[in-house]
Amino acid sequence: MTLLTSPAQPLFDEAAGLLDQYRQHYGANPAPDAALEWMREQVSFERMRIYLAQDAVGLCTVATTPAALTLRTVWLVRDLYVRPDARRRGVARALLDQVAEDAREAGAHRLSLQTETSNVRAVELYARDGFHALTDVTVMDRVL
């Protein structure tokens, strides 16, 4: 597992390629150069942590946000992707486990994520990994 904290790291470009594959998986047009530039910006401004699985077969992006009530942070899994040829081999679980370990070590209050309810495989994976659906929270969105 590699934590990418700088665009200068050797596997950064491979991670950007995986991010673009992830985007395409959800219907976005291919944009490898834009994905690479976006990732560079996110990491350079320390808005995102990027975890890359061994052999660049999967990645997980995480944003940290302040949690005023606990005076700690909440880590948000934003994107989790494993190449189709590497699925069902524990890559996603290994990524989530590493993120959870790093969040604990950093003193985070919570590790959260969201996924489409129709993404049954992801929901099952997250439930097996200890995540549970929140029934007392309403997620709202405003597209700008």
Image (tube, helix red, strand yellow):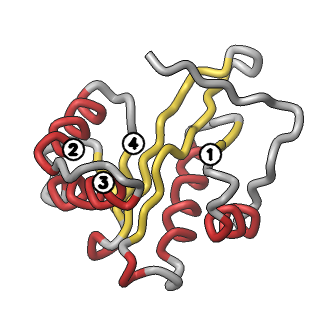
- Residue positioned 53% across, 79% down in the render: 90
Dot 4 amino acid type: Arg
Nearer to us: label 4 or label 1: 1
Above or below residue 119? Residue 33 is: above
Determine whether label 2 and label 3 are within 8 Å by CB: yes
Callout 3 secondary element: helix
Callout 4 secondary element: strand
Dot 1 amino acid type: Leu
Mark closest to the chain's N terminus, 3 or 4? 3
Mark closest to the chain's N terminus, 2 or 3? 3
Residue position marked by numbered label 2 in the rendering: 35
Determine whether label 4 and label 1 are within 8 Å by CB: no
Dot 2 amino acid type: Ala
Residue position marked by numbered label 4 in the rendering: 49
Residue position marked by numbered label 1 in the rendering: 113
Residue position marked by numbered label 3 in the rendering: 19
